[in-house]
Amino acid sequence: MDRNQLMKWIKAPTKMAHKYSLNAVYFCTGCGVIEVPPTITSRWDAERFGVVPTATARQANLFLITGYVSVKTLRAIIRTYEQMPEPKYTVGFGSCTINGGMYWDSYNTINQLDKYIPIDGYIAGCMPRPEAIFVAVTHLWTLIDKDMADGYKRYRKNYAAYRANQEMILGEMEWPPIFQTEVATAITEREG
Amino acid sequence: MTNPLGTRLDATFKGVELRSGVDGRLAVVVPREAIVPVLTFLKEDGYDYLQLISCVDWIDRGEFELVYLLSFYTEEVVGGDGGKQEVLLKATVPREQASAPTATSVFAIAEPHEREIHELYGIHFEGHPRLTPLFLDRNYEIPPFRKDFDTKQYVADVFDRVPPIDEEG
Amino acid sequence: MRILWFVLSPLMALAVGLFFLGLSRRFMARIQWRVGPPLYQPLIDILRQFTQKSVSHGPLFDLGVVLSLASSFIVVLFMPLGGTAPLSSSGGFLVVLYLMLLGPLGIALSGGEAANPNVSIGISRKLILALGYEVPFLMIVLALMTYYGTISIGEIVAAQRESASAIASFPLVFSGIAYLLILPAMLGVRPFEVVGAAQEISSGPAAEYGGPYLALATIQHGLTMFIGISLFVNLLWGGASNPVVFFLKMLVVFAFGFWVNAAFPRLRVEQAVRYLWRWPTLIAFVGLILVATIGR
Ligand code: SF4
């Protein structure tokens, strides 16, 4: 740890803690997930940077969505995302989450993930190499440093719009809205 | 064609047509009504493993082709040339009001395969115990694997209709 | 002096427990030919978890974690960590035995409130496992108490200081071996890791914990590890005259525990109980009989 780092730790310890303890949810959607095992095991060893997979959504703060999202998976993704404690960060992995990728004209995969949940960053490629995950992580560090990884705040702020989009695809959802819109706005105003 | 199994099938059933198989597979085309009897016959003959049921949409001919791939678990079945032999059983059903007899009475494993075909091609299997949806949880006007299902139009109508989130608003 | 120890020994337990958590991650990483996280990674994780928002599933959910953490801290107060224990009375050992059960019980209470099936499976596994290692553990404890004729940890340590440490003296060597055999189960490391199996039951009792709850549960885990190891050092390895030597002795026991962790695959819960009720129980029983017949 050099002096620069030390100063950052003294100035904003929580921010630094969020940066260096990114626990990802074990959630595998598409084919891209095949790149995750080498990333967390001996070859690339993501634990060096504090990136480890955790078993449940409650313990995590990073959501790596690895690949195409079918309608059924979308429902599970939304549930998982809403269960994660704030602050939480989402990264879309692979072109399928950006614009549908090679499944752009499929009858059952939603094309653009950020219409349904907020995304803090994307990794392009089909499929991206494990190195790309590290690039994404370092990029996410920069975003957290600059307070720009604010997906969870945007979700709260625009919850009504997100929920409307989700209902458009999923139809009637079996759980009630997690934010009352007025409450969400109030919290956002208080916390910025 | 001098295939012992083929000869016997020809003698037992009416309207059986043999096609030259590749890779040790014997292709047998049967009429729709003969699916279950022929399957039973083959099962007794040693083909005790139904590997898969597949479906092809021949939209120009106006019919679906069901393909049953039969293989063996317990004992190797030897064909005419002395090598292993598997059987491809093919039957056609019309596209309009498509329906076929279920094979679940012969092979229990046919149940999920037929459910899947029912879901993706809309073929009704008479006598199937539960033709409920298997994978999909949405309703499609035309089953999505039929050739006349326009995926591009569908994506434009359903997924592209969802507006992007206006972050500034 | 004693007042000082009241503050010092929980702090020391906390620091050493967290250090052990970090060291174990590093240790495993090196064995798997990885670099591994920095030693202070558990601290970062705990800081992160404390600043996350989490949901509560009810009052018992909150209180259960606190109960288990508090009981662990009180147990620490009864431990002579290379000096006098802040809370030491003649019956100290019996109190420790009771309080040690409160740790898993608190987690069980709190997890029960969450009504998550994975949590229930994890808790039932934990309690079955506890049933498995409590039997040999009680025999070891009984042998020790009979041998030294006291029920106070401090006096056992003092008695060992005068003569040889328990594990090096004849009839008690059986108890020492039995304790080493059940140590991984008490620490909850690999062969007995079914309780918090991450992939199968989503980390079991901790499945519903997020944010501060998870932080407290992590600290509790560290303390459990500390207590298990320090009990061994105190009861069977003669304690120590100052905290530094005590810590070094703990480090050796810890290294043994994690060598086992790295080398063995996981046992199913009934296999674990079968193992615990066979060899450790047998050896502990032999030790108990010998102590009762031969005596000092
Ligand atoms: S982007 Fe490519 S690798 Fe990733 S899920 Fe889509 S098709 Fe698979």
Image (spheres, grey):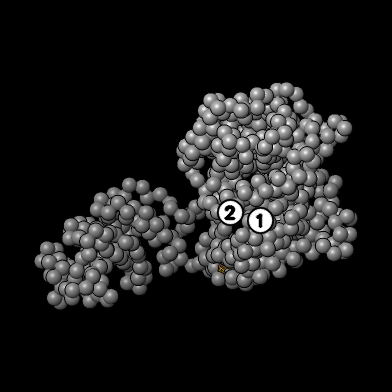
Residue C72 in the image: above or below residue B92: above
Tell me the SS state at disc 2. Answer: helix
Q: Which mark is residue C27?
A: 1
x and y percent of residue A130 in the render? 63, 68
- State whether label 2 is within 8 Å of ligand 1: no
Residue type beneath disc 1: Phe
Quarter of the image for residue C165 reads top right
- Please give the name of the residue rendered at 75% of the width and 63% of the height, measured from the top-left corner: A140
Image quadrant of residue B119? bottom left
Q: Residue at x 57, y 40 (%)?
A: C177
Q: Quadrant of ligand 1?
A: bottom right
The C terminus of chain B appears in which quarter of the rendering?
Answer: bottom right
Mark 1: few, some, or many residues within 10 Å (few <14, many ≥20)?
A: many
- Mark 1 / mark 2, whichever is N-terminal: 1
Label 1: chain letter:
C
Is residue C103 found left or right of C272 in the rendered image? Answer: right
**Marks 2 and 1: in contact by CB < 8 Å?**
yes
Q: Is mark 1 within 8 Å of ligand 1?
A: no
Residue C186 showing in the rendered view: no
Q: Is residue B36 left or right of residue C217?
A: left
Q: Secondary structure at mark 1?
A: helix
Q: Is residue B123 visible?
A: yes
Position above or below: B160 against B103 = below
Q: CA distance from mark 1 to mark 2?
A: 9 Å
A142 relative position to B130: left or right: right
Q: Position of residue C111 (x, y in %)?
A: 62, 35
Q: Amino acid at mark 2?
A: Ala
Of A1 and C9, the residue lying toward us: C9
**Relative to residue A19, is residue C277 drawn left or right?**
left
Task: Give x and y (percent) for residue B46.
Answer: 20, 60
Residue at figure coordinates x 55%, y 62% from the top left: A30
